[in-house]
Amino acid sequence: MTTATLVRLASFFGLLAGIGLWEVFAPRRRLTVAKAKRWRANLGIILLDVLLVRLLTPAGALGVAAAAQKAGWGLLPLLGLPAPLTVFLAVLLLDLSIYLQHLMFHAVPLLWRLHMVHHADLDIDVTTGLRFHPLEILISLLVKLTVVAALGPPLAAVFLFEILLNGTAMFNHGNIHIPPAADKVLRLLVVTPDMHRVHHSVTIRETNSNFGFNFPWWDRIFGTYRAQPAAGHEQMRIGLAQFRRHLPLFRLLVLPVTGDAGRYSLDHIGRDPTVLTRAKRSR
């Protein structure tokens, strides 16, 4: 096992355990489904995803970056920038590609059917950040490998980005309490749980906002940023309107062909949600 693999595994399991404990001792919301029931399904689909990726691309994005470097492919080497700036720019562009890919999975009805598996979770926690249909993982992998080949980024940038992507996906899906003052500062630099939770609202217009994973800037630049859910974080409903029961692993795997896609793809953006009054919230 290589040093890079050991570092990635250590960061993955360390963050999974750390955020999982944070959720136990300082949760942001009360869960609606027992954690053990949800985790069986979520961890099951995550395991399938990992096996698929390891089977199809053992070398992964690092292997493609190494091949690109050896063959002299890519845009970034042509710019002749200093190494630290090249690494930063590569991570930034890779993150932009993930943002655009996320938009694509909401915009294309067929891809939305795959992405529904991620959004159908009735609660949101550290495991939700890694819960994606295997076919979505395969498409995402092909997109990432294509972007890496086109950019020709340094190996260090790809390694850093992969750790960041896994880490921030678990962090910003975490059911963790962060003081509002700290969240206000943090979301200037990274997508926070309160920022991303809006994206998992059952309200269509809120679902189609806050697409970023690592950096929060793309949502602000492209006009998809929404600061808070209309109902507030404690009262907002999470998931999709058409799936209001917990779905076990097998149901999740067949959901793209058996489930109702609803009106969540971007061609049905929905009405702007109104802020509830205190009287309405109490009903």
Image: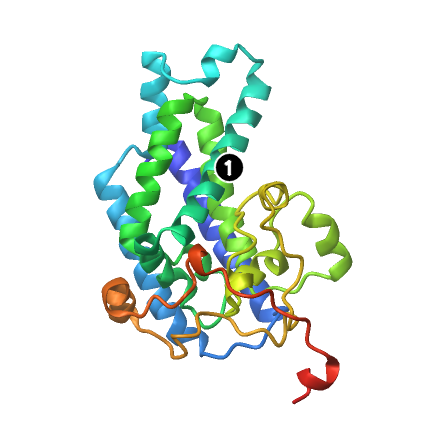
Q: Which one is in front, 192 or 269?
A: 269
Q: Is residue 102 above or below residue 255?
A: above
Image spot of residue 253 (x, y percent): 26, 63
Q: Residue at x 61, y 47 (%)?
A: 223
Q: Assign a secondary structure to mark 1.
A: helix
Q: Is residue 108 above or below residue 24?
A: above
Q: Which one is in front, 76 or 38?
A: 76
Report the residue marked by disc 1.
Answer: 96
Q: Is residue 249 above or below residue 186?
A: below
Q: Quadrant of residue 19?
A: bottom right
Q: Quadrant of residue 24?
A: bottom right
Q: Residue at x 51, y 52 (%)?
A: 15
Q: Residue at x 40, y 60 (%)?
A: 118
Q: Label 1 neighbourhood size at 10 Å, few (<14), some (14-19), many (20+)?
A: some
- Give the number of callouts: 1
State the quadrant of the C terminus.
Answer: bottom right
Mark 1: which amino acid?
Leu
